[in-house]
């Protein structure tokens, strides 16, 4: 069974809800999904041993949260090349965080990314539940 790691950074919980829905989509597709708050990832070894990775942060003042920036520097030293990747985040109006995370996973780590970052205003807005579950299914489909 493929293994997926979802790491999120959130201030008020919206991005965590998106992470949980992506995990549901992965599990529907017979992928074992592990969800971690970004503060639980302490060293690059904590990132190793997975086939699929999704990193997410909400956007504040046009940027991802600082904890996710720290994670992205740590992940540079992990073996992520050619692994399947996706990025996500809750946002209010501009949503830079998910795009920046996606670009880093693609350009710095050389990951095999799904087509686009997942940006949602909230898990319960604009069909967010289905869209986020669908993102998990898309990640799983790349592993099959
Ligand atoms: C002080 C502040 C600044 C924000 N700045 C942005 C921003 O620059 N761009 C944006 O799209 N959303 C911005 N937002 C909206 C948050 O991204 C949005 O509320 C999001 O759902 C929070 O997700 P979280 O609960 O995962 O932290 C801001 C919110 C606050 C309170």
Image (cartoon, rainbow, N blue to C red):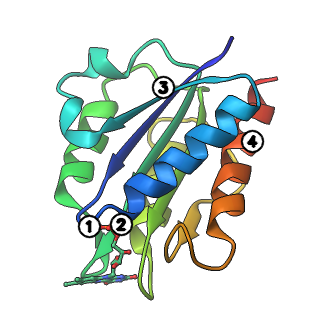
Residue 10 at what x, y percent from top left?
A: 28, 59
Few, some or many C-alpha atoms within 10 Å of disc 3 (few <14, some 14-19, many ≥20)? many
Ligand 1 has an atom within 8 Å of the beta carbon of the residue at disc 2: yes
Spatial CA span between label 2 and label 1: 9 Å
- 2 vs 3, front mark: 2
- Helix, strand or loop at label 3? It is loop
- 1 vs 4, front mark: 1
| Residue behind mark 4 | 137
Residue 32 placement, left or right of 11: right
Q: Earlier in the sequence, mark 2 or mark 3?
A: 2
Q: Earlier in the sequence, mark 2 or mark 1?
A: 1
Spatial CA span between label 2 and label 3: 23 Å
- Helix, strand or loop at label 1? It is loop
Spatial CA span between label 4 and label 3: 20 Å
- 4 vs 3, front mark: 4
Q: Earlier in the sequence, mark 1 or mark 4?
A: 1
Ligand 1 has an atom within 8 Å of the beta carbon of the residue at disc 1: yes
Q: Are marks 4 and 3 in contact (CB under 8 Å)?
A: no
Residue 43 at what x, y percent from top left?
A: 20, 22
Name the quadrant where ligand 1 sits: bottom left
| Residue behind mark 1 | 12
| Residue behind mark 2 | 58
Q: Is residue 41 visible?
A: yes
Q: Are marks 2 and 1 in contact (CB under 8 Å)?
A: yes
The front one of 54 and 10 is 10
The front one of 26 and 102 is 26
The front one of 80 and 39 is 39
């Amino acid at each position: 069974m493929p293994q997926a790691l979802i790491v999120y950074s959130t201030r008020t919980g919206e991005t965590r809800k998106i992470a949980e829905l992506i995990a549901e989509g992965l599990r529907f597709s017979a992928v074992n999904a592990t969800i971690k708050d970004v503060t639980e990832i302490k060293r690059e070894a904590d990132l190793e041993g997975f086939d699929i990775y999704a990193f997410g942060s909400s956007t504040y003042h046009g940027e991802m949260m600082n904890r996710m920036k720290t994670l992205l520097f740590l992940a540079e030293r992990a073996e992520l090349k050619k692994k399947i990747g996706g990025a996500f985040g809750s946002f209010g109006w501009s949503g830079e965080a998910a795009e920046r995370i996606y670009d880093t996973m693609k350009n710095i780590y050389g990951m095999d990314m799904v087509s686009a970052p997942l940006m949602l205003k909230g898990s319960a807005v604009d069909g967010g539940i289905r869209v986020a579950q669908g993102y998990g299914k898309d990640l799983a489909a790349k592993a099959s």
